[in-house]
Image (cartoon, grey):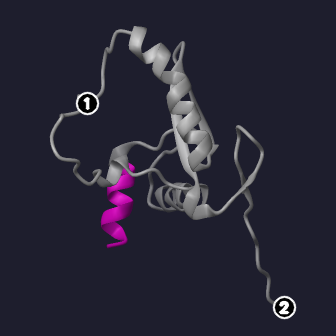
């Protein structure tokens, strides 16, 4: 008997069903705790807009500075992944001896190793 599993992803902000290709995973940290939201394009835009008022008042303490030059393609580690891709990376990492949590950000070194193994 064949079995097919369908993963349905919903927008964490408005509850709508999302096409996997439209999922934008937004991560943020508050008081040392990292959070993740699965959002569609409209909700991601709203999230970015809502966060901007806080970002404008905050002091940047880390991360990369953006350049005001022509837009470049994001590095592989900067591309947002959908849930199924993140699950595949976690599974591959565990099978290959990496320690990775069930939730939260996957370290860039693991993502890069996964990409190298699958290209």
Q: Which numbered disc, 2 or 1, marks the residue closer to the eye?
A: 1
The quarter of the displayed image where residue 34 is located? top right
Nearer the N terminus, badge 2 or badge 1?
2
**From the viewer's perspective, is 114 left or right of 3?**
left
Q: Secondary structure at mark 1?
A: loop
Q: Which mark is residue 1?
A: 2
Which region shows up in magenta?
A: 110-119
Front residue (pair 20, 44): 44
Q: Which mark is residue 64?
A: 1
Q: Which mark is residue 4?
A: none
The quarter of the displayed image where residue 103 is located? top right
Residue 1, horizontal then vertical, whole percent: 84, 91
**From the viewer's perspective, is 79 left or right of 41?**
left
Residue 93, horizontal then vertical, whole percent: 47, 56
Picture residue at 33% right of the left edge, 58% below the top? 113
Note whether 45 is above or below 21 in the view shown: above
The quarter of the displayed image where residue 112 is located? bottom left
**From the viewer's perspective, is 96 left or right of 115?**
right
Front residue (pair 105, 36): 36
Q: Secondary structure at mark 2?
A: loop
Note whether 98 is above or below 34 in the view shown: below
């Amino acid at each position: 008997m064949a079995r097919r599993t369908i993963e349905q992803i919903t927008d964490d902000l408005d509850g709508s069903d999302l096409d996997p290709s439209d999922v934008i995973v937004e991560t943020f940290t508050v008081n040392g705790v990292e959070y993740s939201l699965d959002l569609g394009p409209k909700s991601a835009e709203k999230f970015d807009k809502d966060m901007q008022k806080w970002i404008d008042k905050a002091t940047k303490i880390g991360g990369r500075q953006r350049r005001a030059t022509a837009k470049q393609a994001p590095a592989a580690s900067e591309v947002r992944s959908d849930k199924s891709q993140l699950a595949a990376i976690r599974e591959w990492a565990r099978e290959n001896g990496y320690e990775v949590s069930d939730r939260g950000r996957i370290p860039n070194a693991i993502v890069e190793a996964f990409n190298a193994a699958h290209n």
